[in-house]
Amino acid sequence: MMLPWALWAFLAVLNIFSIALFGIDKIKAIRGGRRIPEVTLLLVSFFGPFGAYAAMLILRHKTRKPKFLLVPIFVFIQVGLLAYLIR
């Protein structure tokens, strides 16, 4: 079964949003502004894990926080779900 293009587009938007949110939080961390709550970042990471993981690696943001070790697990969960839905 092939996934509809709208679902692929939705996943792409979620991952782009995830990268943007991590980037905004990184900028706020540098400038000392009001930060995005970690719960929000983790929730966005669950739905857009590829973007979150890419942002963590590229921006080196939230890589030392133990909670954010969940992000690679979220990647595997999403890959598994997509593999199941595509087959």
Image (cartoon, rainbow, N blue to C red):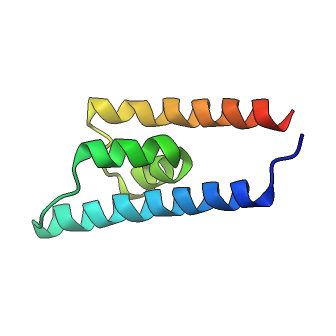
Relative horizontal placement of residue 33, taking residue 43 as reference (left or right): left
Q: Is residue 12 above or below residue 46?
A: below
Picture quarter with the N terminus: top right
Seen from the viewer's position, the closer of residues 1 and 24 is 1
Residue 38 location in percent, x, y?
A: 25, 44
Instruction: Say which residue appears at 44% left-offset and 37% top-offset.
Output: 71
Residue 28 location in percent, x, y?
A: 19, 66
Give the mark count.
0
Seen from the viewer's position, the closer of residues 37 and 32 is 37
Residue 67 location in percent, x, y?
A: 30, 31
Residue 46 location in percent, x, y?
A: 47, 40
Relative horizontal placement of residue 80, taking residue 38 as reference (left or right): right
Instruction: Say which residue appears at 31% left-offset and 51% top-offset.
Output: 61
Relative horizontal placement of residue 47, taking residue 70 as reference (left or right): right
Q: Is residue 67 above or below residue 45?
A: above
The outermost residue toward the left is: 32
Residue 87, image quadrant: top right
